[in-house]
Amino acid sequence: MIINHPLLGPRDAQEFVYLGDARLIHRPDGLAEGAAHAFHDYLYLRDNPAGEHRELWYHEQGDRSWLVVTRNTVTHEISRVELARDVARAEGRSK
Amino acid sequence: MRYSGLRVIAEALTGHKGWKPVWRDPAPQPSYDHVIVGGGGHGLATAYYLAKEFRQARIAVLEKGYLGGGNVGRNTTIIRSNYLLDGNQPFYEFSLKLWEGLEQDFNYNAMVSQRGIMNLIHTDAQRDAFTRRGNAMILNGADAQMLTRDQVRAIYPFLNFDDARFPIKGALAQRRGGTVRHDAVAWGYARGADQRGVDLIQNCEVTGFRIEGGRIKGVETTRGYIGAGKVGVAVAGSSSRVMAHAGMRLPIESHVLQAFVSEGLKPLIDGVMTFGAGHFYVSQSDKGGLVFGGDIDGYNSYAQRGNLPVIEDVAEGGMALMPMLGRARLLRAWGGIMDMSMDGSPIIDRTHIDGLYFNGGWCYGGFKATPASGWCFAHLLATDQPHKTATAYRFDRFLKGRMIDEKGQGATPNLH
Ligand SMILES: Cc1cc2nc3c(=O)[nH]c(=O)nc-3n(C[C@H](O)[C@H](O)[C@H](O)COP(=O)(O)OP(=O)(O)OC[C@H]3O[C@@H](n4cnc5c(N)ncnc54)[C@H](O)[C@@H]3O)c2cc1C
């Protein structure tokens, strides 16, 4: 698979480390009510869809950036690649 | 029809005209007491033991494709009980004991071959870890043996003993481990279940559950609605998709694992060998092909085919261990979809819906588990109690912090 890095252009997926579902960006608040259950769901439960999947890849053997890759789990086709930083900001995560 | 040597001779003399189809092809009944979703090894074994050991009736297995077309027909056929942790080892040893009597039990030649398995050791630390594992195995009633470098050399003189990175220093061996003809396991269980009145319904995909007041009523399928007292789901790589119909999210990701077979060679490897440090394992089939594999590809996939980097990685591991492998040609490669759980161990449990039960999370190691998984799932379906060797395989272990994490990797399914 080739991942079209937003800054570096097309790169072999082998340069990356895979983490999983991009919902992992949304770490729960550890001090909130019901945090233990929220962390259980966050850490262990997955949608695991057949079809389009937004997922986190880390460019370990490159520029060390985290990417959100939208990939089809049935065809392995990659339709979109974004910097995880931009996605997290757009979804209201970091400052 | 029972199989016997006499029968084979009689058929040989009469032109093999007396063999009948091994199971019926029934149309689905309006309802059953037990509906098993998934006609892989685990689903078929569950139905077989439900009928035979737990004396249940009105059982159906619903399979979306053909019997045995999933992982049970795609794996590299290794059986063993060399686990470390208490939650696992008694279960896998129960499974190995069932394998030892399986062919007599279901009167079918599954080619169970206890040719032995060895896990290679390359460092002192690894020897300590494997010694501990071997002790845990023995404490749980299994067999284990530490082999020295010279003992390994006597068996496989052609290995690369002095590799600069991973010199071979010995091995942990389990003599009772080995291989089994995978398709024959599916066929043997299917035949045995059919003979006891189980309806095996193929080309029947479950597309939804009918749930009323928190209780299962039946399943929607591509062949119409089928009512059910209890529903047991054993669909391996499709676990998340099927359980989503019941509104459940599982501690599972689906990943692809590849396997490879070389051209047929003369007898070379008489057991199973794992080179964990090099992400490679190998055995030799009775036809002579070297059957080998390595890691999963490492990203979520439902594709039943993998990518080239892992093929290269597996080939490199093989070359590092036994350089002569470079002379053999690769004949076939294929992939299967693994239900990788968050701690690398399986789940056999009821769900929050009355009458709906789940069996999955087998990762790349569920073939060896087939007999015990079927037995324990049948036990749960029939008695509503977990079998004593499967008490740890609960959904809530993740919430309660009781993970069964053999590798200590944490919630990273692609690393288990
Ligand atoms: C390449 C490879 C190598 C492996 N090597 C080993 C090994 O050496 N040793 C070992 O112990 N394990 C090994 N495994 C793992 C082992 O094969 C699996 O863990 C085990 O087979 C899974 O259980 P099963 O046989 O029931 O799965 P499957 O045979 O996959 O059965 C599941 C069935 O469910 C059906 N299904 C799915 N969705 C639906 C639906 N909606 N409705 C109806 N039916 C449905 C599927 O069609 C399928 O037939 C390997 C796996 C692979 C892919």
Image: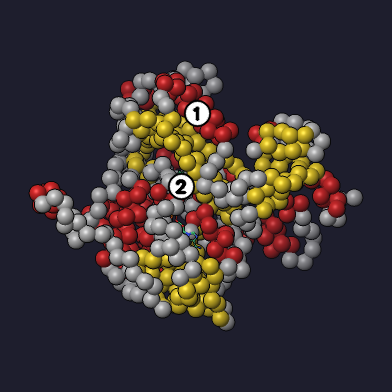
- The type of residue carrying mark 1 is Ala
- The type of residue carrying mark 2 is Gly
Q: Is residue B95 left or right of residue B306?
A: left
Discs 1, 2: same chain: yes
Residue A32: image location, x then y, percent = 79, 63
Image height of B100 relative to B231, above or below? above
**Residue drawn at x 51%, y 72% as measured from the top left:** B220
**Residue drawn at x 80%, y 39% as measured from the top left:** A6
Judging depth in this view, the residue of B368 and A67 nearest the camera is A67
Q: Callout 2: residue from which chain?
A: B
Judging depth in this view, the residue of B313 and A28 nearest the camera is B313
- Residue B246 tag number: none
Judging depth in this view, the residue of A3 and B114 nearest the camera is A3
**Residue drawn at x 33%, y 45% as measured from the top left:** B180
Question: Between tags 1 and 2, which lies in front?
Answer: 1
**Residue drawn at x 55%, y 77% as measured from the top left:** B211
Residue B357: image location, x then y, percent = 49, 68
Provide the secondary structure element on which disc 1 rests.
helix
Q: Mark 2 = which residue?
A: B365
- Asked whether mark 2 lies closer than 8 Å to ligand 1, one says yes
Asked which quadrant contains residue A33, the reply is bottom right
Residue B300: image location, x then y, percent = 61, 48
Residue B328: image location, x then y, percent = 41, 25
Answer whether labels 1 and 2 touch (C-beta < 8 Å): no
- Residue B315 tag number: 1
Q: Quadrant of the C terminus of chain B?
A: top right
Disc 1 to disc 2, C-alpha distance: 21 Å
Badge count: 2
Provide the secondary structure element on which disc 2 rests.
helix
Image height of B214 relative to B195, above or below? below
Q: Callout 1: residue from which chain?
A: B
Image height of B352 relative to B153, above or below? below
